[in-house]
């Protein structure tokens, strides 16, 4: 995978994770304050982006990979299971659905992002409608 492709995947994953946290604060949804995403630090984001990128490129449908924030400097242990749910193709366009389950401090949170790419281009997070 090219550096450009990795950078785009990393930025997309970071936007997904941080957008969920910021959206919860903006809507004054206090019950989300103690969810796993609220404990994620920038170094965790950088690390999980790499795990998502690797899963998109290397895992087959139904396969999972685990991520743990060990060594990130975060005092809160966070782990995730990243599962490739499905892949679809339409000509040169490939889309992959992921299941991401984050765990921290006894709380669990599930995310269902979809990434698509054109040919050998970069994976891009798709907005759900």
Image (cartoon, helix red, strand yellow):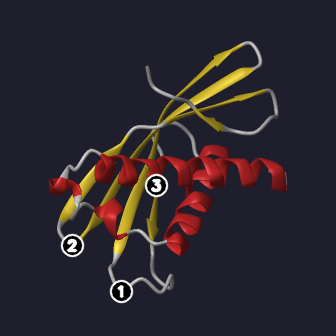
According to the picture, the residue beneath numbered tag 2 turns out to be 105
Residue at the spot of label 3:
18
* CA neighbours of label 1 inside 10 A, class few (<14), some (14 to 19), many (20+): few
| Count of numbered labels shown in the rendering | 3
Question: At numbered mark 1, what does the secondary structure look like: helix, strand or loop?
Answer: loop
Nearest the eye: 65 or 37:
37
In the picture provided, is 31 more to the left or to the right than 21? left
Marks 3 and 2: CB-CB under 8 Å? no
Quadrant the C terminus occupies: top left
Marked residue nearer the N-terminal end (2 or 1): 1
Q: Which residue is drawn at the image coordinates 65% and 18% (left, top)? A: 89
> Which residue is depicted at the point 50% across and 85% down?
71
Q: Is residue 112 visible to the viewer in this orientation of the structure?
A: yes
Q: Disc 3 versus disc 1: distance between alpha carbons?
A: 19 Å
* Coordinates of residue 40 in the picture (x, y in percent): 41, 68
- Mark 3 lies on a secondary structure that is helix
Q: Which residue is mark 1?
A: 75
């Amino acid at each position: 995978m090219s550096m450009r492709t990795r950078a785009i995947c990393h930025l997309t994953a970071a936007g997904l994770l941080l957008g969920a946290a910021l959206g919860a604060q903006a809507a004054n949804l206090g019950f989300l304050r103690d969810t796993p995403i609220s404990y994620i630090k920038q170094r965790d984001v950088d690390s999980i982006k790499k795990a998502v990128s690797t899963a998109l490129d290397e895992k087959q449908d139904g396969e999972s990979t685990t991520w743990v924030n060990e060594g990130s400097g975060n005092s809160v242990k966070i782990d995730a299971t990243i599962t490739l749910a499905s892949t679809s193709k339409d000509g040169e366009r490939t889309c992959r659905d992921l299941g991401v389950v984050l765990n921290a401090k006894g709380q669990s949170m599930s995310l269902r992002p979809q990434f698509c790419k054109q040919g050998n281009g970069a994976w891009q997070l798709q907005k759900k409608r």
